[in-house]
Image (spheres, grey):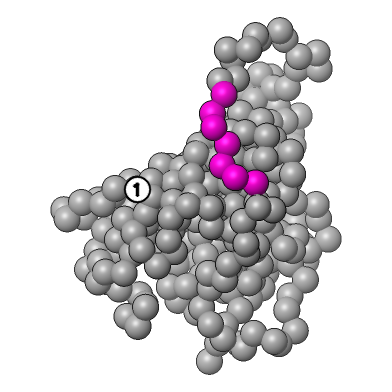
Amino acid sequence: MLPMVGCVEPEAIFLRPAPDRIIPTEFARGPWNPNALHGGPVAGLAATLAEQHDDGLPPVVARVTVELLRPVPLAPLHVTTVTRRPGRKVAWVDVSIADESGREVAAARALRVHRLDVPLAVGAHADPAVPPIPAPESVPAQWIGLDGAIGYWSAVDFRLVRGDWTAAGPGAAWFRLRVPLIAGEPTSSIARVAAAADFGSGVGNPLRQSRTSAINPEITIHVHRAIATEWVGLESIAWAHGEGVGLCETRLFDERGVVGRGTQSLLVQDFNPFPNS
């Protein structure tokens, strides 16, 4: 049975009792299976591990690709992080997440790049203006989860800017984590962006309210600067084809403007995970 809302909620999405051991809490649960994680916490965790892996590498995570190889269990996980290719200005880091039996359930590769101590004069055209989405404070909060259950939806503030959560996309929304990603650790900019970006396929879902679903087995996130606040905005559009493949594209915002972009390959299948919706 799923835990009922009103029970004592966890202090964070993950616990880390040891550097290579991660314990998901109920806040990491996804909607597809009560014993499996949502992709957002997995993406945020992978981005965090890639960023924390030091070895004197360039500090900025500019891109991370997360592959959801199998359902990630709501159970203790073993994590490893290695330098795939070191470098002074660019480097690649690999992350592996495995279940208690040692089976790899998710993997990620991150690109880390240098940060200049003295910014260059790049000119106004280097940061083209993009119309912002309305500020999160101007949009009412909205519940997006499964009634009567604690899951990832319980750990985020959600503000739908455009679209309809009960109808097919495209759409735009704001997300903010209500709790730390990992207990006792600060949640970094790239972790917040990655944890929110997985929602793109939901915000821009082209198949909502049908017997067909589109689930993303991966996500790739590019960022060109850190977010200025805790809020991450998503402006998402997605395509789905009857042959079985789809794509979601998300422009990522903070309250100052665009910070990056996310893409998700979609698995289109004859399956409605919420038959009563």
Q: Is residue 115 above or below residue 153?
A: above
Density class for disc 1 (Cα within 10 Å; few <14, some 14-19, many ≥20) is: many
Image x and y of residue 137, in percent: 69, 53
**Which residue is identified by label 1?**
238
Residue 28: give x, y in percent of width and height. 60, 68
Q: Nearer the viewer, residue 62 or 4?
A: 4
Q: Quadrant of residue 155?
A: bottom right
Residue placed furthest toward the right:
184
Magenta stretch: includes residue 122: no
In what element is the residue under mark 1? strand
Dominant SS type (magenta): loop
Magenta region includes residue 130: yes
The location of residue 81, given as percent across then percent down, is: 63, 46
Above or below, 89 relative to 263? above
- In this rendering, position of residue 27 left or right of residue 209: right
* Range of magenta residues: 129-135
Which of the image's four quarters has the C terminus?
bottom left
Residue 189 shown left or right of residue 195 in the figure:
right
